[in-house]
Amino acid sequence: MALVSSNSQPCCTNNTMGLNPSRKVRIVAKIRGFTDLEADFPSGVSWISTKKPKGEASETVSLSFGDQSASHKESYEVDHCYEQNEDNDIVFLQEVKPLISGVFDGCNATIIAYGARGSGKTSIIKGTSEKPGLAAMAMDEILSVAEKNGNSVAISVYEVYQDRVCDLLDTKQPAVFVLEDAQGKIQLKGLSRVPVKSNSEFQKLYVSGLGSRKPAQTIANELPRRGHKGLILYVLAHNENSDALLVGKMNFVDLAGYEDSRRKSSDSLSVVENSRLNKSIYALLNVIHALSANESHVPFRESKLTRLLQDSLGRPSRVLMVTCLNPSFCQDSIYMVNLASRCCQRINHAASESAKKSKSLARATIHSSHKSQIPRSVSATAKKQATSRVPLSEKKANGGIVSALKGRRLFDEARRFTTSEKILPQASSMSDNISAVEHSVDEEILQEKPVVTNAIKSLGEGNQLSDVLKNAKAEPISIVEKDDPLSESLKPTEFASTVEKDVPIEENHLEGVTLSVNNSEKMLNFDKEGQNSEKENKISVVDEERSPPISARLREISNNLKSLYSATPPCVKMPEENDASSYALVPLDIMEPKTPMVDTINDRWEVANFNSPWETLSMCSSVVKSSLVQEYLRFLNTANKEELKRLKGVGEKRASYILELREESPEPFKSLDDLKEIGLSAKQVNRMMRKEVGGLFN
Ligand SMILES: Nc1ncnc2c1ncn2[C@@H]1O[C@H](COP(=O)(O)OP(=O)(O)OP(=O)(O)O)[C@@H](O)[C@H]1O
């Protein structure tokens, strides 16, 4: 079906966002009903409390978790919370239906369900044929309005897994490319669009049919189970030539369940995969944060999903975020709500005084105050992590860094909270009962960094490699790389902005990376809101000339260390088992690979205790191979067209295609596997690499 963009101007002036039409993002929570298993819980009641902060007149609802008797309670504000007994039809009527008329006026809408694993995301979006989800209800409504207006309707169903998109309606499609045309419009190349005339057709395609089918065999190998599932409902108009003109679209996204990557994944996803998945959830939340804060830059390019949804998230679209909550204890749920409320910069710390005040305003709807429902480990975590993040309101009271929020990413805030732990003990003591949300997002993003720190420890003193690593660690500020999400979280402003005047801090340590803070930065303090923005801007200037090599070096070294480890035979000397310091920075439940002891003598690598020269040689070859591959990929990600054409197997066409891919994502080649995207088979890639290596000896 040919699809041409409609000329109709979007008109989103109708009340499409519930109570407040001026806000483009609305964030609601939905507490899932108990499953049969959970119904047998001793208390049989939810551990989530909701209350209206300003009494019945409140436009928002604050959520808190667990023990209500605590004097200090952290609460998270959302626009509304749907209780366990409120079914999908209520959510549809109040939240989704009002968006539909906007879609017919050219105002795209996106409904995103997100939350911890098993929190009811699929049930609310997709539902079942017996208990329809929001998508089916929306389809019903859209079909009936389309019939009246003479429009037609079509759908696409896709999955985003590990930043790759695949078509779930046509499993023969190898991959979907997200491209941006000259007008900035997003094109989903390779995503099929199927016309739908009735709800039963939709049910067949999406609810019980192809849309829920596993991707084709070839793709299934690359795309394992846990990904983000998306549905696009297109409303189309037809001109005299029968061209289909896009009027508007409604997206439904069932995000993959969030799971703290420090825990062992329950579906045996590797730490890296899980972490990458979480990173894409953060990327989406960063976008939502930027949109709600009306920031001029919205980081759509951070993930494939946000890129794909760009024209349905950005202005003038409407976004509904449904935070799905498990009705029984789930640490990840608290974390998700925490992020949701931060998206709207709504986080309250109801300290005792304000709690007293609020008593007269509203009575909490407390579903449970059952301490027993919260496992012991949580209180233990609470104590262990008593140095919790500081709520925004608290920070304001402490000198106000709220003004510094604008222009920052949601997950930079997480880092700031973590840093402030060290310097605002009085504030941190107020958060004892929160525990569950202490987990810093950046740990996920930076989860590879402990490898580097451990490596330095393991390598020992006087080692060339450990020196390189140390230098990289000690490099001041310049390790920040523009537009690099990994380095983004290390922006010096994040540290500077949290440093209190009187607190002497020489260094900030995070995740194994040390940033030196010089005296002038150390003296930063916020007497008045915003006063320091100029200074802050100055120190946030990135030394772009110096930055890339260092962060690139870190990454390369980290990769090499990993491959060194994987290539290491069992006889390689490991750090002492009982040397706890080697793992001091490693999250408790993740075993980082142990890095072998490596000595450098006369510029030559020698691996201690190798059984034979053969093993040494094999190990070295493996390191060289890995370096070469990394260099090759870097070349593909950065070289210009003429340079690309110098590669064996890359002609004019492929070189252009590589550049096209780079338009789409700044670093499209992360592994040799990614070369499949430019039409090279594994065999061809192998042959090419052999030729490259062979060429070195010509
Ligand atoms: N309102 C409800 N009442 C009772 N049980 C429910 C309700 N909603 C969902 N469930 C049950 O909860 C479980 C998890 O639901 P669902 O699969 O929708 O969660 P999910 O968040 O999509 O999970 P995942 O993170 O694994 O994708 C399922 O067994 C489902 O039947």
Image: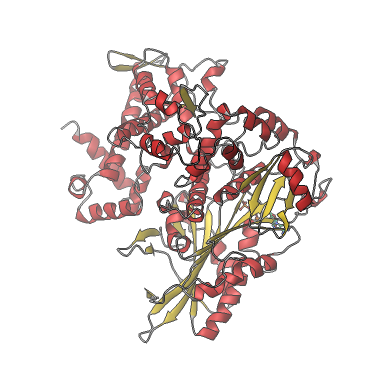
Tell which residue pokes out farthest to the front in this image. 528
Q: Is residue 51 left or right of residue 107?
A: right
Q: In the image, what residue occupies the spot 75% across and 33% down?
A: 376
Q: Position of residue 417 (x, y in %)?
A: 55, 36
296 lies left or right of 635: right
Residue that appears at 41% across and 54% down: 296
Q: Quadrant of ligand 1?
A: bottom right
- Residue 385 against residue 667 in the figure, above or below: above
Q: Is residue 208 visible?
A: no
Q: Quadrant of the C terminus?
A: top left
User: Which residue appears at 76% of the width and 61% of the height?
Assistant: 85
* Residue situated in front as seen by the camera: 313 or 673: 313
Q: For this rendering, which residue is in front, 365 or 570?
A: 365
Q: Is residue 697 above or below residue 17?
A: above
**Colour scheme in the image?**
secondary structure
Residue at the bottom extreme, as displayed: 240
Quadrant containing the N terminus is bottom left
Residue at image x 40%, y 16%?
Answer: 610
Question: What is the number of callouts on the image?
Answer: 0
Q: Residue furthest right?
A: 42
Image x and y of residue 468, in percent: 34, 22
| Image location of residue 485, percent across then percent down | 42, 42
Name the side, left or right, on which 250 lies relative to 59.
left
Decide which of 43, 396 is in the foreground and name it. Answer: 396
Q: Is residue 126 at all visible to an observer of this figure?
A: yes
